[in-house]
Image (tube, grey):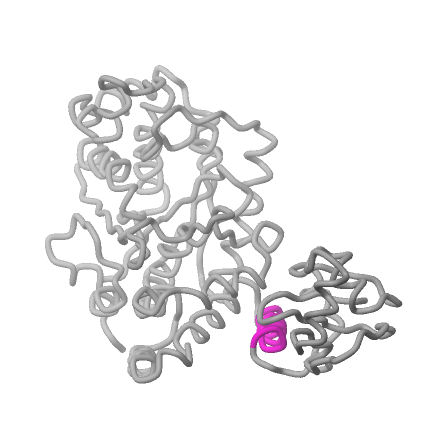
Amino acid sequence: MTKLSEELTWRGFVNQTTFSDIADVDEPRTFYWGVDPSADSMHIGNLAPAMMIRQFLDHGHKAILLVGGATGMIGDPDGKKQERDLISLEEVTRNKEAIAAQYKTIFAGKDFEIVDNYDWFKGVNYLDFLREVGKNAPMTQMLDRDFIKSRIGEGGEGISYAEFSYALIQGYDFLHLYREKGASLQLSGADQWGNCITGVQLIRRLEASEAHIFTTPLIVNKSTGRKFGKTEEGAVWLDPAKTSPYKFYQFWLNVDDETAEDLVKIYTLLDRETVEALIARHRENPSARELQRALASEVTELVHGKERCESVERVTSVLFGGADFSSLSDDDIDELAGEIPIATLGQSVIEVLTSTGVVASNGEARRLIASGGVSVNGEKIADDQTIEAVSLVKKGKNAFVLVR
C-alpha cells in the first residue's frame, strides 16, 4: 500500500504542517476535523478536506469529527470583512444535525466518532477559561493575523470581542480533545491555520506535550483564479434540497479541462493508475470529456448515492447525449421535472413552447417547427401536434420542456 505521505502529496493535499518531515503523518494517530454549523449543509469547499480525511482513515488513523455547536454560536471571522450575523440556537441545533448526517454519508463504512464542542463548553466557567486559556494565548500573535489587521486597521469594519476570541475557543477544542480523546493532530483547510496554531500552543504550554496540524490547500479554479466551489447561483451544496443532484452532477461535468485534472485526484477515491490513465486519454481526446464524466460520476455517487447518480446520468444522456426518452424511469422523470420547464398534457407543441416561455410567440414556434428546430422525444417534427403522453420537447440544443 502507498504510504500516506506519498498519497497526500500526489493528490495535492499538502499545504502547511507543523511536522518537520511530512513522512511523520505515516504514523497512525488520533486526529480531529471540525465544521461549524453556520449553514444546514456542507458545500464542496468542505468536501475537499473531507476527502483528505478519507485518506487518513484508509491509512489507519483514528478520526474524531466535530460539529461546532459552540463555535457556531459565534462564527469564524477569518476571511470575513465584516461582523457575522448571529444565528439562533434553533438554527445551530438544526444545522448540527444536518452536518452530522452528512458526515455519516461521506464516511460511510469507516470508523469515526462525532463530537459537539457545545457539550464541553456549556459547563465552562468564564473566569476559569480566562485563567487557563486566556493567560496562555499571546495577544501579539492574534493581532498579527492578516484578517485582524484588516478589520481593525484604517477603513476596516472593526471586530467584536466575541469574534476576536473565536481562535481561543477552537484552540480549547484541541486541548480538550487531546486530554479526553488523545487527539494529537488537527486536520483542516488552509484558511484555518491560524486558529489551529492556538490549540498547538495551548497543548504545549499546559500539557508540556506536542501536537500537530496538517492543512490542505484551498481549491482554486485554474481558469478563473477564483476560489473553487461557487457558481453564479452561489455555493455548490451537498444537501440535495439546496443543490439538486442533477445540478451537482452538471457542475462537475462542466469543469474546465485543466482544473479537472487536479480535481479528479482530490475529490475521488480512484487509484493512481486509474486516474493517470484517465488523464492520458483525456489529453488525447479532450472533447470526449471522459475525465469530467468520471469526476462527476464519482463525486455524485459519494454524496448522493449510486441510484441517484445513475438517475442523473440517464437524464443527462437524454438531454445532451441523444439517449431515448423512453429509457427514463418515473423517478428519472421526477428528477428531470425539477430542472426544466413543465407543461401539461393535451396541449399542442406550439402551446407548450409559448406557455413555458421557451419562445416568445406562436409565429416563432411555427417557424422553428417548419425549419426542423423542434423535436419531440428525439424526433424532429415538421408540423404542430398535440401531445397526449409524457414527452420531452426540445428546441435547438439546450432548451427543453417536460410535458406530463
- Position of the N terminus, as image quadrant, is bottom left
Q: Going by the image, does 239 lie left or right of 386?
A: left
Q: Is residue 224 above or below residue 310?
A: above
**Percent coordinates x, y for residue 178 in the rendering:** 31, 42
Residue 331, by quadrant, is bottom right
**Residue 92 visible in the current orientation:** yes
Which residue is at a point 47% across and 66% down the rendered structure image?
299
- Position of the C terminus, as image quadrant, is bottom right
Q: Is residue 225 above or below residue 286?
A: above
**Percent coordinates x, y for residue 247 in the rendering:** 55, 60
Q: Going by the image, does 103 lie left or right of 291?
A: right
Residue 194, by quadrant, is top left
**Percent coordinates x, y for residue 146 in the rendering:** 21, 31
Along the line of sight, the residue nearer the viewer: 69 or 218: 218
Q: Is residue 18 above or below residue 254?
A: above
Q: Tell me if residue 37 is in the magenta stretch.
A: no
Q: What are the residue bounds of the magenta stretch?
A: 307-320
Along the line of sight, the residue nearer the viewer: 97 or 334: 334
Q: In terms of secondary structure, what is the magenta stretch mainly?
A: helix
- Say how many tags the image has: 0
**Percent coordinates x, y for residue 129 in the rendering:** 34, 21
